[in-house]
Image (spheres, grey):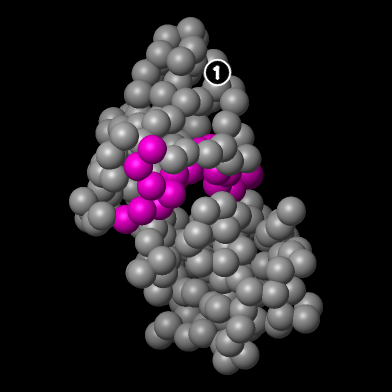
Amino acid sequence: AQTVTQSQPEMSVQEAETVTLSCTYDTSENNYYLFWYKQPPSRQMILVIRQEAYKQQNATENRFSVNFQKAAKSFSLKISDSQLGDTAMYFCAFMKDYYGGSQGNLIFGKGTKLSVKP
Amino acid sequence: NAGVTQTPKFQVLKTGQSMTLQCAQDMNHEYMSWYRQDPGMGLRLIHYSVGAGITDQGEVPNGYNVSRSTTEDFPLRLLSAAPSQTSVYFCAIGSSGVLDYGYTFGSGTRLTVV
């Protein structure tokens, strides 16, 4: 069974600084997808970034980037130039393969609560 | 979220009562699922469906029932509510054709069982 571990329950960062959230996972699969979701106080689940395991290049979305280390089964999220609006819970998630029966189910870590301080 | 409607947003139940959480989508996605979110536990899969007439259990299915008679709707039923079912519930939908955007989540239902 796949597992996702986020070892930092809470983190804080000063506005405009950079912060990195950690995520490790365990799987015997070779093809899979990894995601970071953001959940602000509004409770809405928002997709931040996605990484396909077969791609060596790290995904980037504006101020958000990942460091994907397949051999180490590590998938960290870096937030540059942190903004007050980045304050949220961040969840790392694993999907065995793209949608196709149970392969499409997301497995979540327990989350990291990020606070951005002015 | 546009395309996924969850109702109600809040609900208080007494132990032993039954209720149905509704999830409706207008995006014609095959995949629909229910997750529950508890403090310190992340999101855990309850049930999922890969199409009308097809459902299967996730990680924490006990105490919950689902059916999928149409593509659009995927209700979650609590037959006899228990305090352990106090949680925030999310419906999520997806399609292989739009994986670039990940799964789309509803806005959640906060359920309290007293």
Q: Position of residue A83 (x, y in %)?
A: 41, 74
Give whichever of B53, B96 is nearer the camera: B53
B106, above or below B11, in the image: below
The segment highlighted magenta reads: B29-53
- Rendered residue at 62%/40% (across/down): B59
- Write down the residue under mark 1: B83
B42 part of magenta stretch: yes
> In the image, is residue A54 above or below residue B62?
below
Q: Nearer the viewer, residue B4 or A41?
A: B4
Q: Is residue A103 visible?
A: yes
**Residue A114 appearing in the image:** no
Residue A46: % across, % down? 39, 61
Residue found 40% across the figure and 74% down from its top: B100
Instruction: From the image, give the main secondary structure of the stretch colored magenta.
Output: strand
User: Which residue: 63% across, 44% down?
Assistant: B40
Between A36 and B66, the one nearer to me in the picture: B66
- Please check the rendered image and state whether residue A44 is part of the magenta-colored stretch, yes or no: no
In-front residue for pair B98/A114? B98
**Picture coordinates of residue A33 (x, y %)?**
57, 71
Q: Position of residue B68 (x, y in %)?
A: 36, 36
Query: What amino acid is found at the position of numbered circle 1 in the picture?
Result: Pro
**What residue occupies the far front of the structure in this picture?**
B53
Image quadrant in which you'd find residue B28: bottom left
Up/down of A1 relative to B23, above or below: below
Mark 1 surroundings within 10 Å by alpha-carbon count, few (fewer than 14), some (14 through 19), many (20 or more): some
